[in-house]
Amino acid sequence: MQQSLADPGNGLGKWEPVVPSTIVVFSSGGKFSGGNYFFSGFNRYSVENDSVMVFGSTVTNSSIKVRYTLSSYSLDIYPPCIEACGFKLAYTGK
């Protein structure tokens, strides 16, 4: 994970670098690992359509839908937040 977005409620939120950078792994078969506080606890993912992903946990049997955008250089994930928030993941090619 390269950047995160958090808005304190005044509309002035902006993308900030994540230091140190966090590794998030999307594996074949829907396996998922890594990330920060938002992603902790999730170990599965699926793509519902071209703008919605589902992260789930086989441990707690819970899931959450998130919006996403995909470009040639990043996967941007937008969890359901009251104020603007998001995570920008850069491709590593691994």
Image (tube, grey):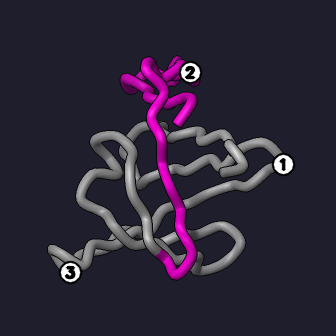
Q: Residue furthest left?
A: 60
> Mark 1 packing: few (<14 Cα in 10 Å), some, or many (20+)?
few
- Magenta residue span: 1-30
Q: Residue furthest right?
A: 72
Q: Which residue is mark 2?
A: 14
Q: Is residue 24 above or below residue 18?
A: below
Which secondary structure, mark 3?
Answer: loop
Q: Is residue 17 above or below residue 87?
A: above
Q: Verify whether residue 27 appears in magenta.
A: yes
- The label on residue 23 is none
Q: Earlier in the sequence, mark 1 or mark 3?
A: 3
Q: Position of residue 19 (x, y in %)?
A: 44, 18
Q: Is residue 22 left or right of residue 73?
A: left
CA gap, disc 1 and disc 3: 33 Å
> Mark 3 packing: few (<14 Cα in 10 Å), some, or many (20+)?
few
Mark 2 and mark 1 in contact? Answer it, CB < 8 Å: no
Q: Which residue is mark 3?
A: 61
Q: Is residue 5 above or below residue 45?
A: above
Looking at the rendered structure, the kind of residue marked 3 is Asn
Q: Which residue is mark 1?
A: 72
Q: Position of residue 27 (x, y in %)?
A: 53, 68
Q: Position of residue 85 (x, y in %)?
A: 46, 38
CA gap, disc 3 and disc 2: 33 Å
**Which residue appears at 50% of the width and 41% of the height?**
86
Mark 3 and mark 2 in contact? Answer it, CB < 8 Å: no
CA gap, disc 2 and disc 1: 21 Å
Q: Earlier in the sequence, mark 3 or mark 2?
A: 2
2 vs 1, front mark = 1
